[in-house]
Amino acid sequence: MSVGTNEKPAGKAVFFWNTLGGFLSAFQSVAMLMVITRVGNVVDAGIFSIAYANANVFLNVGKFGVRNYHASDIKGRFSLATYFYARVFTTVVMVLLGAAYLFYSASQLHYAPTKSLVILLTLIFKATDSIEDVFIGDCQRRGKLDVGAKALSIRFATNILVFSVALVLTQDMVPSLVIATVYSLLYVLLEPFWMKSKRGLTSFGDASVSGVVKLLFECVPLFLATFLLLYIGNAPKYAIDAQLDDASQAYYGYISMPVLVINLLSSFIYNPFLPALTSAWTNGECSRFLRMFARQMVYIAAVTCMCVMGAFFIGAPVLGALYNADLERYVIDLLILLIGGGFMAVVSLFTLGITIMRRQTTLIWGYVAVSLTALVLSNSIVDLFGIRGASLLYLLLMFVLSLWFGAVFVLGARSRILSHRSR
């Protein structure tokens, strides 16, 4: 059953709202960190930085790697109800696993009660992103990404405002996070009704336990891939948490923020083209698929170069002004992280292409190998070289991943081309 998605690249409305939604998604942590730094201090900022990083890792348990699968399911193999119930289940697992990991970390690293509570609340706060994502994925599948992205943009913008006002009034992160979480949950519960009125969502349809299990089973490789990617990306932060102090965590958080810019600007470009890429691959138009894919690679390279050049000239002063901190001594670390961010954007694009090929099981071994490398080396490197070591570690891990997935992608495309020639 087809869901009637558009095969043409997205129009201006999709680009605008997808860009705005992605920007606000990244800017949420930046804005919250800015307000925390000014209302509180650098230690509070460090606590929030590790809390947000931790929540983002477990958010991938909630999302379970289903989004790209959902958006590329243009034949409607699974109903919206199946995607929704699967997401509710994985989101509950996300919170439970995140809480268990927090208990372990708090006991091993001797977290203060307030730090533990902030980490737990941030985890629950981000869980609402997981539920919302299933509705946006369905909009994207139907060629209505602008409807989903508009709802996402409004939620992130108002979330930032609600949290900021609450923090200024209470002078305390704990009640501020509670207020922001309640608001976000209410918004997400009402959001599907608005999307449906705008024809962004299909009807929920039927679902069964067997259907949910089958969907989750198909997405296990994607889940492991995205989860391990986030662990790899945050490995330097975990090493800083274990070897350095909360102030160092804050400074690393400040200079790593622009890395999100590269990934988001890149995703603004290739996300709207997902239906067209899927259509080209499904219809056997390999040359068209590869041309479109190569164009996205060029865009990522251009975005990365622009960000690195901008950071070299004005990165430290701008970030220093944003966070009220002196970051001049971290310029080299900032540039290293940005180059690593470019490789991470390449990894994300290759993951998207490999998912369209339905060869997602090949992703796992690369992630496992690099994750184990990060697990073994991270603490030692950060202990020896501090923030510079964390920055170089991030670049190394992303570079190795990009090589692995580039090879997997090329082999998948080559196999498809050869199979067509043999017919």
Image: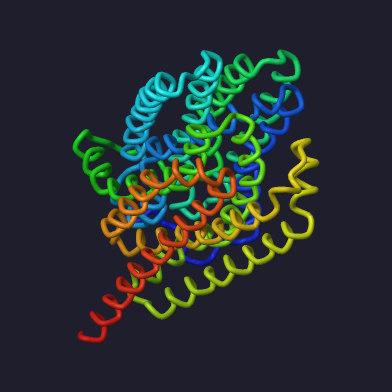
Instruction: For the N terminus, give its image quadrant.
Output: bottom left
Residue 356 visible in the current orientation: yes
49 in relation to 267, above or below: above
Residue 363, quarter of the rendered image: bottom left
Q: Residue at x 42, y 34 (%)?
A: 58
Residue 303, x across and y down, in percent:
64, 64
Percent x, y for residue 118?
55, 21
* Left or right position of 178 against 223: right
Residue at 49% from the left image edge and 52% from the top image edge: 393
Point 54% across, 73% down: residue: 295
Looking at the image, residue 134 lies above or below residue 348 = above
78 or 342, which lies in front?
342
Where residue 386 sits: x, y (%)? 57, 43
Image coords of residue 297 (percent x, y): 52, 69
Question: Is any part of residue 154 visible from this angle?
Answer: no
Compared across the picture, whether 243 is left or right of 365 comes to right
- Nearest to the observer: residue 416 or residue 384: 384
